[in-house]
Amino acid sequence: MLKTLLGQIGKYRRDTLLAPFFTALEVVMEVLIPFITASLIDYGIEAGNFQKVLQYGGLMLLLAFCSLAFGILAGTCAAKASCGFACNLRDSIYEKVQDFSFSNIDKYSTAGLVTRMTTDVTNIQNAWQMILRVAVRAPLMLVCSMVMCFFISPGLSAIFLVAILFPGAVLIFIMLKTTKIFDEVFRRYDDLNASVQENVSAIRVVKAFVRESFEDEKFRNAADRLYRLFVRAEGILALNNPVMMLVVYGCIIALSWFGTQFIVAGNLTTGNLTSLFSYVMSVLMSLMMLSMIFVMITMSAASAERIAQVLNEVPDLTSPENPETELADGSIDFNHVNFSYQHGSGEGTLHDIDLHIRSGETIGIIGGTGCGKSSLVSLISRLYDVSAGSVCVGGKDVRSYDLEALRDQVAVVLQKNVLFSGTILDNLRWGKEDATLEECEEACRQACADEFISRFAEGYDTWIEQGEPTYPAARNSACASPALF
């Protein structure tokens, strides 16, 4: 899964590497500031040496400025890398779906694919940005702060080692409990999106049969199931902050108690104790950031799995190694063809079809709904593969052709018309990308659609789309008339 996702970084690899690098420099600058603060207090303020105050104060300002600059650079690179990563993921998923055969697409619902390209990719984007920044900053700050603490006072630093064990155990518990819940959450997102899609696309039917209340109830139930799952997950995640705050305040109290005793005994200076307070806050804030990372990774793990599932899907239909690209003629031969939508299911759609159509010949196939007419036609352009036998076009098996070349030379007029967002001319050119305006007008005249199109003020440049009209009145008529094509 990780190999699949990381392969989508692409041209944003440079920003992906620079973000951790600048973050590391930012941490180094921040870690040095408390150390300089201790020297400023001990050798400047307490000693009454104003020159030392100016020297150490100036050095602290320089370190703070460098930390700010590196932080800005790290944040910018992380934003570019995460947004670019998400963009590449969406492009790859969309491109992959275009290569799917119908049998591949049947494995995923439309709502499921939409959820993967929106909600799931957004989760990965947020997690990736946090990994590049916080996942580098938090452990590095933790380690550097602990090293400085042991350098100042090994005895007091033992407090932090004990404190780390407790929140670590809690984080493991949270991850184990919430991973399965979030996996279920994103499956419920599919149901929610499916409900919206069905209702909007079939809104005319819903209103015609007065089923608004039924659809409202169905959507409310889907949203309620999602709500309950989120409440369960967030209830467990809510343990994170109280546990972290308990550790923070416990460490501060312990450090204050033992630190004052060390100062009285002469084993620690005031400046060193001040630095320890700064480092202990850095250590504990790093722990809190690490807990946030674990929570985000837990939420995004399910999304990552769902995205990788689509990207790793192998299309059932592919072109052969040395494909044919030219069709000799328009002859079609069905040679004892058997076909089933689910191979091995035992329920065939077509049985022993032996049909031979000469080039230029026109035939009609008549049958009741569901008898296999559309399935028969789908085999010609290899939208599906036969279960047994062969389908030949131009005297050659369709499986020997390049898929794009075959489908480009086999024209299909589907039973259900679909309009794509764009102008009438854009939709007409789906059959021939380089068709001239004159060719499109002639096609419409033969289809008796030219008179209808001429009524629009913009003619063939009128905007149309599938589904409910969302455009001005002149465009609405086109949207409401899919029979045009």
Image: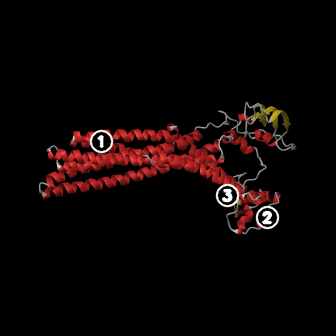
Closer to us: 108 or 479: 108
Closer to us: 248 or 100: 248
Residue 471 shown left or right of residue 89 in the figure: right
Question: Which secondary structure, mark 1?
Answer: helix
> Of callouts 2 and 3, which one flags the residue occurring earlier in the amino acid sequence?
3
Question: Which residue is identified by label 2?
Answer: 452
**Percent from the top left, x then y, of residue 430?**
71, 52
Q: Which residue is rendered at x = 79% and y = 59% of the image?
A: 444
Q: Which residue is rendered at x = 43% and y = 48% of the image?
A: 130
Q: Which amino acid does label 1 sit on?
A: Phe
Q: Which residue is rendered at x = 70% and y = 64% of the image?
A: 462
Q: Of the residues tagged 1 and 2, which is closer to the observer?
A: 1
Residue 319 in the image: above or below residue 424: above
Q: Which amino acid does label 2 sit on?
A: Phe
Q: Residue 160 carries which label?
A: 1
State how far apart marks 2 and 3 are (Cα).
Answer: 19 Å
Residue 184 shown left or right of residue 316 in the figure: left
Label 3: how many Cα within 10 Å (few below 14, some 14–19, many 20+) = few
Residue 466 is at least partly visible in this image = no
Q: What residue type is labelled 3?
A: Ser
> Of callouts 3 and 1, which one flags the residue occurring earlier in the amino acid sequence?
1
Residue 61 occupies quadrant: bottom left
Question: Which residue is identified by label 3?
Answer: 421
Closer to us: 439 or 164: 164
